[in-house]
Amino acid sequence: MSNKVAKLTLDGSAEPIDLPVLSGTLGPDVVDVGGLTAKGYFTYDPGFMSTAACESAITYIDGGKGVLLHRGYPIDQLAEHSDFLETCFLLLNGELPSTSEKEEFTNSIRYHTMVHEQVYEFFKGFPRDAHPMAIMVGVVGALSAFYHDALDITNAEHRKLAAHRLIAKIPTLAAMCYKHSIGQPFMYPRNDFSYSENFLHMMFNTPCEEAKVSPILAKAMDVIFLLHADHEQNASTSTVRLAGSTGTNPYACISSGIAALWGPAHGGANEAVLNMLYEIEDESRIEEFIARAKDKNDPFRLMGFGHRVYKNFDPRAKVMRKICDEVLDDLGVENDPLFRIARRLEKIALEDEYFIERKLYPNVDFYSGIILQAIGIPSSMFTVIFSLGRTPGWISHWNEMISQPYKIGRPRQLYKGSTQRDYPKK
């Protein structure tokens, strides 16, 4: 806690207003403006770009330096030495698990992967061509109807059980969305598979034939989930916290996060990368599109390059690039026209001064889109994969907030409408 005080002087005010300055363990100091309301003022910050709405000990980002820490651990170290479920435990509990804790946590997730049989009936009400995210918003929110035995959010054990159920069941629901869209029967999860193996099994196997899941593809999926596990106070995480501040149940909160992630400005970036590659269509047209990207008067933008938060290299992209190489090599698709375009774009972005000066490096979405496409996951499922990976982050932030004293979210506004006026007499 800092002892510094900021003084705000307003025209016509007799004396300045003292505002406490707070310090975190990392990052810039924060001016506490809570006392302004008593003085008849509040702040104006569209998009909350300069506002800390909460205290959190889960994730820290320094976009200028390309740093992403989960509970203090760098993302590249977690991707190299940890796995998705261990990272889930870390996000939820604050520390890495012991051997016995990890085994207990993994078993808990494994034995919660099945969903209630009546959930299968939900899918019959959705058209085959319904967007998978539309289905996810509905079925995840509906889980509260089946698991109302543990919905006391003031009970730590209930919160823990809800967290485990969500992390375990969302891959099952995600795979069901895909199977529903292609008219294939749903596949039950298997307790002898790892988390990512289970997901690929439920996605691509059928009752007629259960093929062995490639360990390289399973590892790639695990890393994709891990790299998306949390990203601080983004739009969907803030949505989960805001919904949770009303005291609603965790399933409704996560459903609200999925709805926020569905927006193309948030969760649709890797799908946009694929659409861009399809638009370029052929290697011979790359220079044409590069020129268009450099032309500020042309609406075309190269998707998957640069990042709103990271003003340097996206630390997740370095890990994803290595996984991308392994997947393409394992599948033998290096000569696929789409992937040749992607490789050429990557090379240009890493060597062209225009991109280097502006720090427009390939980001995590550029590589994840290529990987998912190579594995055979359709672009309509990309945001579903994102929501699957982000679930532990959402539920960790929800649990952190509910575990402490909190207030219901209530942003203010700068009113610019009509002043009071009387209804016209007839």
Image (spheres, grey):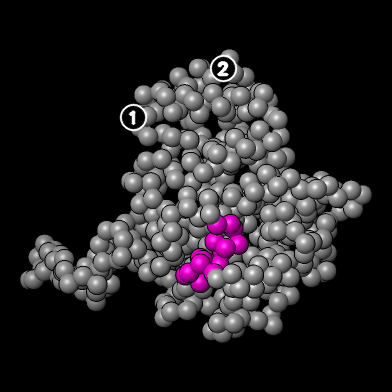
Query: Which amino acid type corresponds to the residue marked 1 in the rendered image?
Result: Glu
Q: Is residue 109 above or below residue 66?
A: below
Q: Which residue is mark 1?
A: 357
Residue 119 image position (x, y, % from top left): 79, 66
Left or right of residue 232: residue 196: right
Q: Position of residue 95 (x, y in %)?
A: 48, 69
Q: Residue furthest left?
A: 14
Circle number at residue 285? 2
Q: Quadrant of residue 166?
A: bottom right
Tell me residue 318's x, y (percent). 48, 41
Query: Which quadrant would residue 189 be assigned to in this image?
Result: bottom right
Q: Which residues, given as a range, are shown in magenta?
A: 82-97
Tell me the SS state at disc 1.
helix
| Residue at 65% across, 38% down | 327
Q: Is 87 contained in the magenta span?
A: yes
Q: CA distance from mark 1 to mark 2?
A: 24 Å
Q: Earlier in the sequence, mark 1 or mark 2?
A: 2
Residue 76: where, in percent of width, then height?
47, 50
Residue 247 in view, yes or no: yes
Q: Residue at image x 43%, y 38%? A: 306
Q: Residue at x 43, y 34 (%)?
A: 361
Identity of the residue drawn at 56% across and 54% down: 226
